[in-house]
Amino acid sequence: MVSRTILTAALALFASEAAAFWRMDCGHLSFERVDPIDAPGKAAGHSHAVIGANNFNKLSNNETLLEAACTTCQVTPDKSSYWIPNMYWQDAESGELTAVTTTGTTVYYFLRNDNTMDVTPFPPGFRMIGGYTKKRTGEFRKPIYDPESVKTQASIKEGASQAELQEYSLGFNCMDWESGKNEDTLARAVIPQPCHEPQDATHKQCPSGMRAEIYFPSCWDGKSLDSEDHKSHVVYPSRVQDGTCPDTHPVRLPSLLFETWYTTAPINALVNAGKKGQFVLSNGDTTGWGYHADFMNGWDQDILERAVSSCKNLSGNIKDCPVFDGQLQSADSGCEKKDWDFPDENCEGPIKKLPGNNPIGDIPVIDDNGTEDDASPLDDLEGKNYASDGDDVSSVASSKSAPAYSAPAAASPEVVAAAVPEEANNGAVYVTKTADTVTVTSEAPAVVETQYVQQGYGKRAINEHHRRHQHAHRH
């Protein structure tokens, strides 16, 4: 664990009269395809870096977490579980993926209340997800390094939608300890993909490492410990980091912020030596818009309640909160995972494909209204491999027959693509999308026009895809 004794950029970003907070360093417990909130009892859709209680598993709930023997975080009475998608480096030549070395995650508990309400501790049994794993493009926020806009929240207009507030809740930044030119928290909207020259708004080498950051919603409906989508019971306040809560969600909770630190020096060396590649999240996202995080409360409730009511120091130093006296440990305490649900799955690499076989790229899965398309009729076709723009689909044809599938689709121009599900024994599956249907069949169209396979894309998304790839080809 890298020592972080200096105040991070988050302090400047979040300082306010009501911004008492504490921060705790946490080591990573495991890298595994487990998500007891979104995929209880089975393998999750992608792998995660897991933080906290050492008995975390596919059936974890708030009660079982309290039985954990130890935690990878500094506060020993906090047996909560926190998890985020893995970050990989993909070599352009071999296609191999290797998990980027991480030096841990810092978890912040901000006690903001806009001076009109008390901050309520997370109740027993509480859980939530922040961010949208399927998001691949920004609708409201520009993918540039813009510290002043984020710091002052100048771009967030009064009455902003939750979709807009969510975009300002996540970010990435480059660290440069030697020069002191560290980027501010949340100031960079997308993953800074490394390239030697030229470096621009979305391409930059991070000399001393990269941070991925996400802010959770902090306005609660006051009654639901969870919701069907694990998000609707909480929303963001009017200015993401602070502001007012809507009448539908009037209870103010602690504001959670995760900062995960990645080591970039080995990757910079490869890029400087002429190697090409890209950062990839475990959900296949190369942009960062699909970054997300999960929280399951496992605190000793008495300790949490006393900390929320009495930890009023603005330093953020966890040692300045007397409630935690005698209950702190190093994040390198040696806490080890108890049991593994899928011990044979390699989630760290080198690997040829992502755990869960997620397609890699900026394939958007957001409809034209900016909402997540959770009900795609193609979600049951696991293990999809996507053809490239303009590929002749006959080149991936197979004598093996593949299943056919047809379902309603949102209105859109025709989209054609090819996929090869593992369950079809590598038989070629071709996807045709019209304004009325999505059809998956083994009968091959002439040319693959686009990689988009999931429903809900309009011309805006398609044009954005081509614009991004034309831009990428210049680097």
Image: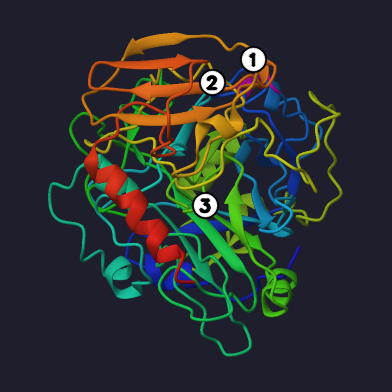
Disc nearer the start of the sequence (1/2)? 1
Q: Earlier in the sequence, mark 1 or mark 3?
A: 3
Q: Residue 82: x percent and y percent? A: 61, 40
Q: Secondary structure at mark 3?
A: loop
Magenta highlight range: 58-63
Q: Residue at x 28, y 57 (%)?
A: 141
Residue 301 visible in this rendered orientation of the protein: no
Q: Are marks 1 and 3 in contact (CB under 8 Å)?
A: no
Mark 3 and mark 2: Cα distance apart in space: 25 Å
> Which residue bears the numbered disc 3?
286
Q: CA–CA distance between discs 1 and 3? A: 27 Å
SS for dot 2: strand
Q: Residue at x 70, y 69 (%)?
A: 267
Return the residue nearer the eye: 145 or 154. 145
Nearest the eye: 310 or 220 = 220
Which residue is labeled 2 in the image?
429
Q: Which residue position is annotated with label 1?
A: 424
